[in-house]
């Protein structure tokens, strides 16, 4: 299976800055077989960057999209409009769940819309600090996973990526603290067990599961060797050229 390194730029970089950053990134990153590098810029930059990007080296992701293809939905962008521009879309990021009020029902519709439009959803799931402290991690993970994948067939699950992102480990969360490899391993195991119950062992094994939360060049190697982890979703460090390229380099080394 490929290793995925996904940079989520969030609400950072203007269109011009995004283009300059991508230009520098393309110069530094070679074509790496088995490591899929993906960047998720602001929606405004997707069109120009889709013309600039070298798809042999890296792919584009949207950070979000709406579940209906067209219609009276002021301010939204649909997966149909993104078709051809991006290969991936981040769905259900904790910032969208907790700041923008997205629930599992909406997230499930977005996952279905992405698949319908041939865009690979990167479905983010993860518990908050208080959910973990109340011993609710397993329930939250199962609910978000099953909730997000309702109506996804066994065949379509092959087109989905799961990202485990404990909210308490995300660098911008107040008092965030990095997760330990053991904490990650335990939840990734639970994710695969839950997938196995619904879709069977083969599909559960073949679904890429990424980890995200304060990833940087000093912990990327340890996180990438956690059993069952197939890549990293990187926020803050993906905005720093040297850090992001170091993480890509580490992924390449771990892979070989
Ligand atoms: C994220 O929010 O998806 C993320 C992983 O952020 P950071 O790497 O900054 O913790």
Image (spheres, rainbow, N blue to C red):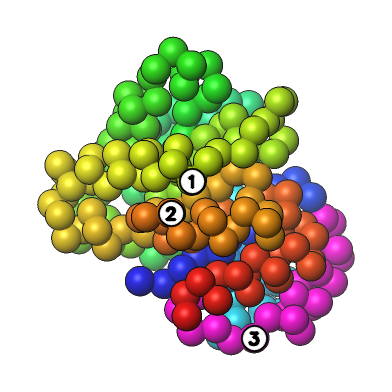
Image position of 37 with respect to 222: above or below: below
Disc number lying in front (2 or 3): 2
Say which of 63 and 43 sits in front.
63
Q: Residue at x 55, y 83 (%)?
A: 32
Q: First in sequence: mark 2 or mark 3? A: 3
Alpha-carbon span between mark 2 and mark 1: 6 Å
> Tag 1's secondary structure?
helix
Q: First in sequence: mark 2 or mark 1? A: 1
Residue 86 locus on image (x, y percent): 55, 66
Quadrant in which the N terminus is drawn? bottom left
Q: Residues within 10 Å of mark 3 (few under 14, many from 20)?
A: few
Q: Residues within 10 Å of mark 2 (few under 14, many from 20)?
A: some
Image position of 199 with respect to 171: above or below: below
Alpha-carbon span between mark 2 and mark 3: 25 Å
User: Is 183 left, or right, of 245 in this rendering?
Assistant: left
Is residue 219 covered in magenta? no
Q: Are marks 3 and 1 in contact (CB under 8 Å)?
A: no
Q: Which residues are magenta?
A: 13-36
Alpha-carbon span between mark 3 and mark 1: 28 Å
> Which label belongs to residue 226?
2
Residue 59 locus on image (x, y percent): 57, 72
Q: Find disc 1 in the rendering and name its residue.
A: 181
Residue 101 in which image quadrant: top right
Say which of 209 and 60 sits in front.
209
Q: Are marks 2 and 1 in contact (CB under 8 Å)?
A: yes
> Tag 2's secondary structure?
loop
Q: Judge: label 2 CB < 8 Å from ligand 1.
A: no
Residue 112 locus on image (x, y percent): 34, 48
């Amino acid at each position: 299976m490929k290793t995925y390194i996904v940079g989520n730029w969030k609400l950072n970089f203007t269109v011009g800055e995004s283009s300059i950053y991508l230009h520098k990134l393309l110069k530094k990153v070679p074509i790496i077989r088995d490591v899929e590098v993906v960047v998720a810029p602001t929606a405004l930059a997707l069109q120009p960057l889709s013309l600039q990007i070298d798809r042999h080296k890296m792919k584009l992701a949207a950070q979000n999209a709406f579940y209906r293809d067209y219609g009276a939905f002021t301010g939204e962008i649909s997966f149909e409009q993104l078709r051809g521009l991006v290969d991936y879309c981040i769905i259900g990021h904790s910032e969208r769940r907790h700041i923008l009020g997205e629930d599992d029902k909406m997230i499930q519709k977005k996952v279905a819309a992405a698949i319908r439009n041939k865009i690979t959803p990167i479905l983010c799931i993860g518990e908050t600090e208080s959910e973990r402290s109340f011993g609710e991690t397993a329930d939250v993970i199962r609910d978000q996973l099953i909730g997000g994948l309702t109506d996804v067939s066994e065949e379509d699950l092959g087109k989905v990526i799961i990202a485990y992102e404990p909210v308490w480990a995300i660098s911008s969360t107040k008092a965030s603290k990095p997760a330990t490899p053991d904490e990650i391993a335990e939840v990734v195991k639970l994710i695969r067990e839950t997938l196995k119950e619904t879709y069977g062992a083969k599909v559960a094994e073949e679904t890429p599961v990424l980890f995200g939360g304060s990833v940087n060049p000093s912990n990327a190697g340890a996180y990438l060797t956690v059993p069952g982890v197939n890549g990293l979703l990187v926020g803050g460090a993906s905005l720093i050229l040297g850090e992001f390229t170091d993480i890509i380099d580490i992924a390449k080394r771990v892979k070989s």
